[in-house]
Each structure stands twice: as C-alpha cells, then as structure tokens.
Image (cartoon, grey):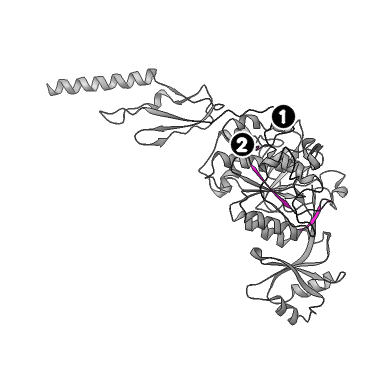
Amino acid sequence: MTQKLTIGLTFLLISLVWLAQSFISVHAADKNAADYEVVLAPPAEALATDEISTAQMIASQQAVTATSSTTLYLPLVFRKFCASAFSYNETLGYNLSKINVASGWQSCSQGQGIKVAVIDTGVDLDHPDLQANIVSGKSFVSGVSSPDDDQGHGTHVAGIVAAVNNNGGVIGVAPKASIMPVKVLNSQGSGSIFAVADGIEWAANNGAKVINLSLAGTGNSSTLKTAVDYAYNKGILLVAAGGNCGDANYLFNGCTSQDQTLYPGAYANVVAVASTTSSDTQSSFSNEGSYIDIAAPGSFIFSTYASGSYTTQSGTSMAAPHVAGLAALIWSQDSSLTRQQVWTQIRNTAQDLGTSGWDQQFGYGRINAAAALGMLQTSVTTADAPLAEPVAVDAAVQTPYVPGEILLKLQTGVTVNRVLEQDQLETADVKVADTIDQLGVQKLAVTIGQEQAILDQLRHASGVEYAELNYIVTAQ
C-alpha cells in the first residue's frame, strides 16, 4: 500500500511539474507604467530582470522547478506602481529626445529628492521654470551677496538640469531635482580657483549629491584638486565641461593651443563631458583628449536664461548638465547606490560613438537616459567603470591669474606668521584675506607685481604643503 501511495504521489508531482513547465509563464509589467520586482518564495531570492521587455518572460518554463520531492515553488510577482503617470506638454528639444529621457521619466524617476549644485554664474532665482526647484544657495563672488544670476550662463545650465514640469517653456533632464545655486563666476562669466574651491566645499557640506561645473581653466591647481577630492570622498559625483578649445577658435575660449587640457575636467575624480550635435557627431568646439569620459548634446541647446527669459547656447557647458541631470534621475530611482555605481550606470549604458569603445572624442559614448534607468547594476566595484586617466601637467603653459593673490596650504600645526617670519616676509606685504577651513587653504593678499617672487619664497619654506597663484576660470 505504501509503495503504491509513493508511486502515486511521484506521478502526481511529475505531472504538476510538467503542467507548470508547459503552461505557466510570468510576464514583466510594462516599464512605462510601473517599477517592479520579482522574487521567489521561499526563499526570497530576486530574479535578474536586466533588459526585460514587456513581451519577455521574467520566469520561463525552465525557471519553474521542483526543489524537493513534495514541494513546488512558484514565482511571485510584486508590482510597485507610480503614484501617477508623468505627463508634460513642453516640446522636447532634440537634446532630450536624443538621450531618450522621456522614456526614462516613466520609470517613476524624475530626480526627486536629489540636490544638484550648479556652480556657475548663479541662477535666476525668480525664473518661472526654475523657481519651484531652487533650494538655498550661496555666492562666493566678492561684493555679491546673492546667488542670483547676473550673467545668464548658470541659469541656462540649471534649466538643462532641472527646469520644472509646468507645461510651459522648457523641461529639464531631471524636472523634480533640486537646484542648488552656487555663484562663483561674476557678471563677465569669470572667476577664480579659490572661489570655485570654496563653492565646491560649501555644496559638499550642504547636501549636494551631484555637482555640475560648467567652467574650466588652464591652470592645474592643487587647491581646486583638493576641493574636488574633498567632495568626491563624500560620495558626490562631480561633472564638468570638457572644454571648448577643440577648433581654430581656441584663443577666444581662453586656451593657448587647440584641445588644451582644461581643469577641473581633467582631474581623475571628475566626469569630463564632451559635446555632441543633433546628428550625434562631435561638436566642432568640443575638446578631445585622454581625460574625456562621456558625451552629451551641447550644440544649440534651448534653455532658461536670465530675467525669466529663454535662449539657445552651445558649449560643453551645455553638455555637462545633461549628465548631471541623468545622475539625479538614477539616484532618485535608487538612493542606495554609491557614486561609483551611478557613474557605472551612465558609462555602461551610453551609446557608443566614433571608434569602438572609449575614444578621445566621445569618451564612452553619448548618454542614454532610458537605458541607464532600465538596467540598474547594483553590484559593481570601483574598477568596473574608471574615469579617464588624468593627464600630465605642462609646466610651461602660461595661465592667467588674479593679480595680488596667492593660495597657500600649510602642514598641520604650522602657522602663517611662522612661515612669514622664517622667510623674512613683511606682514605688511602679505596678509591672509580669506580661508577655506575644511580644505585648510588660505588666500593671501600680496603686493601686485610681487606674486612670483613671494611665491618662490613660500615654496621653499618649511611647513608649506603648497603655494600657487589664484588661477582664473571661465564659463564654457
């Protein structure tokens, strides 16, 4: 009797497995309608869903198996719906269509909860397409107390990142992200390394998750690198313009040679962005070089501008905020991701352009928001997606600087007075004008015309980590 019962149960189990394999399938929820997760119970083990389309099966016939002689585990599908469908009436420019951002928005990710610091000329605080997304900011331009934009460049950049969805004007890559206006460039679009470093440090300490730097200079500054590394070590993704010295007009963009290396984009801990056109070719002005990491549209981009207006501009300054906005989208989809995982997602889903693989024109390719939001890879290591290699320094390059200023960092425990006394520098000729406490960097005011002589003395003094000129940077 027992033998007959065992045979009967075995036959029934085999029949159930055959029926499951023959008839049971589970399909993915439409990605345009919901986010979803598939688990097995028991045990609760997630099934991989990379690159699943609506018509594909998440659990195939082969995935349904008998794990013991008496138990059959079937897949359970849990769907997490968006609270409401994301709709908009703004006409998308070629730039947003090219990076497939509209499809990405339907993944429930529009940048919500993510602060993007726009370190630039400021932002028009009253612009109707930006005001709702603006959070507290700060000005680091001497004599200017507000981060309001008196030039227009920063407002244009901010609109690309996160112009609001208000069914009018334009819409940004991450329309629900927060814009943190940090003014470091003056009304002429120019500023100093010290101001930029001060702005980076402030943004890093005030909740920025992404920092956009649509600016550049030819000076390889230890102060700027210190600020970049400070923010990087806090888990922040820094994105910068790759530079606009890629054609014969390089002199008009502050360079002394074509494709001259520019900073902060060339630093290892910064994502340097090249510019592309509506036909996915390299923008004529876009720098190429060993430090270029990724590309995004930057030619003829229509966006917000000063005094509540709109305009079209071109530059790697316009390309960079597309990448910053995409980082905000990815983080709003999964806030647990590390900076390195976000970068890996951007890199691995980019549309390859030019030479196969990484190249000096486009880096790893032109960003693709829909792909980046549809194939999250949460188990990566730092080695999986390195940034481009830092470049060698050309000491012979003459870099413009702020007259009468020197940047100084001392070793721990060393004071400025001690250094000045040992070098017999008169305190009347050298004074501390400002300090970035978290970075340990001091700005010295010196006699105009004596910068190089005093710099040489400081560099040879004991207790000095570095001393350098306060280089100039400009909007790109």
Please state if 42 lies on the left or on the right of 463 as rendered. left
Local secondary structure at mark 1: loop
Q: Which residues are magenta?
A: 166-192
The secondary element bearing badge 2 is classed as: loop
In three-dimensional space, the C-alpha distance between marks 2 and 1, rounded to whole angstroms, equals: 15 Å
Determine the residue positioned at 53% across, 39% down: 377
Q: Position of residue 48 (x, y in %)?
A: 47, 34
Q: Is residue 358 left or right of residue 457?
A: left
What label does residue 92 carry, if any?
1
Residue 218, quarter of picture: bottom right
The answer to whether 37 appears left or right of 465 in the picture is left
Residue 110: mark in rendering: 2
Q: Earlier in the sequence, mark 2 or mark 1?
A: 1
**Residue type at the position of mark 2:** Gln
Residue 379 visible in the current orientation:
yes
Magenta segment includes 99: no
Q: Which mark is on residue 341?
A: none
Q: Nearer the viewer, residue 364 or 253?
A: 253
Number of marks in picture: 2
| Viewer-nearest residue: 124 or 19 | 124
* Mark 2 burial class by Cα count in 10 Å: few <14, some 14-19, many 20+: many
85 and 462: which one is in front?
85
Measured as percent of width and height from the top left, residue 379 is found at 50, 43
Amino acid found under the numbered disc labelled 1: Leu
Q: Residues within 10 Å of mark 1 (few under 14, many from 20)?
A: some
Contact (Cβ within 8 Å) of mark 2 with mark 1: no
In the rendered image, the vertical position of residue 405 relative to residue 286, given as above or below? below
| Residue 359 in view, yes or no | no
Question: Where is residue 91 drawn, in percent x and y?
Answer: 73, 28
